[in-house]
Image (spheres, rainbow, N blue to C red):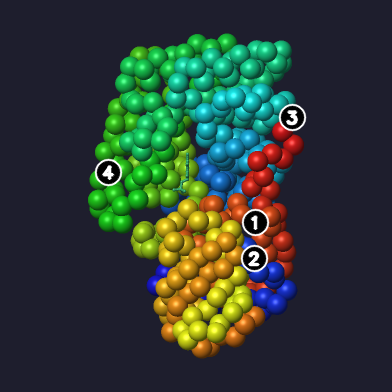
Amino acid sequence: MYWKPELYRIENADSIFSPGLLIFRDLVEKNLAEMIRIAGGADRLRPHCKTHKTREITEIALRLGITRHKCATIAEAEMLADAGVRDILIAYQLVGPNLQRVVQLAQKYPDVEFSALADHPRAVTELSRAIQESGDSTISIDLWVDLNSGMNRTGISIGPRAIELVEMIFSSDVLNIGGLHWYDGQNRQCDLIERTGIVNAGWDQLIRFRDQLLLSGLPVPRIVAAGTGSFPILADHGEPNLELSPGTTVFHDDDMATRFPEMQFQPALAILTRVISCNRANELTLDVGHKACAADQPAGRRLAFPELSSVTELMHSEEHLVIKTPDASQFKIGDHLIAIPRHACPVSAVYQFADVIVDGRAVDRWGIAGRDRMITI
Ligand SMILES: Cc1ncc(COP(=O)(O)O)c(C=O)c1O
């Protein structure tokens, strides 16, 4: 198994509410160091903060030299700016009131470079209009052209329309061209050789397109690409203007750890849960219902328990999880267990704060600031 149960022992667990979110600070620091090692330098990373959403982890990343960050929401962007980041990519196409909100962000943090994604001319027109209508000539926002890497979520296909989009941003009076955005989060194949082949096939397509743009005299200052599954593969290309944007690796989780056994990250986010009922043989009822752990994963596969030899999730309701385990007789009501989320990113969003564990002791509490839909803007 990927986990080492001794890493998750807590001496003063009695002080922690359950269900409660835990951040193991030393493991976060190790994961960030491993991201830097794989990327080949802190300046080659633009991690996505959607996983941790905290000012404190952003500050640790800044101290390690990771100065560029990525986020998905205006609130996450504000959290990053508050923590001191000066180069923030909102990896989202801005529409509706978010157009005005990004203008307000740029006004509130004039020394921060904000950028966003576009995969359609309309997004370019509307953001230009929002900036012009603000009447503030100091606002400058970069747009990255979001390319469809085959994930079919967002992004414009490589081809003539994508070239026109780059031209449109390049010729804009109020916007700058950031470069190309390529998120290939669909590349999660367990087999590393298979994954490497697929990731590199996408990369070849991307680089051919970049070179075509350059040959036509269009600028491509940077490329931002990759998630957890692909960033070690793309890092090996040594492309100078590439920024790698994994996110989950900051915390890592049970899904990534079992899917990518070759990676040396260790889950750094967990939930402390307690036994609240145990009247049936080989069964425990825990206080980690699906409101306390995010239910995007299929029922039966939402949590892993490093301290238990085997577990079957029998029932998951709003406030309860019933598990079957041969180790049940070792537990009584009130005992706690550590649960590693199958998918870390939506779990951090469920909690207002996390207890921070250092050297086996809860020593601090960090607010999950970026979970809010709005901070001030
Ligand atoms: C646009 C974008 N970039 C980067 C990431 C980070 O990827 P991963 O979670 O695989 O590390 C995500 C994750 O959803 C994403 O949506």
Mark 2 or 3, closer to the camera: 2
Residue with the mark numbered 1: 351
| Count of marks placed on residues | 4
What's under tag 3, amino acid-wise? Lys
Residue 309 lies, with reference to residue 65, above or below; the image says below
**Residue farthest to the bottom?**
329
Disc 2 and disc 1 in contact, CB within 8 angstroms: yes
- Label 2, label 3: how far apart the Cα atoms are: 34 Å
Q: Element at badge 3?
A: helix
x, y percent for residue 324: 45, 78
Q: Amino acid at mark 4?
A: Ile
| Residue at the spot of label 4 | 198
Sequence-first disc among 4 and 3? 3
The crowd level at tag 2 (other Cα within 10 Å; few <14, some 14-19, many 20+) is many
Q: Give the labeled residue for mark 3.
A: 108
Q: Residues within 10 Å of mark 3 (few under 14, many from 20)?
A: few
Could you give the CA–CA distance between mark 1 and mark 4, rounded to whole angstroms? 36 Å
Are circles 1 and 4 on residues that touch, CB within 8 Å?
no
**Gap between marks 2 and 1, in whole Å?**
8 Å
| Quadrant for the C terminus in the image | top right
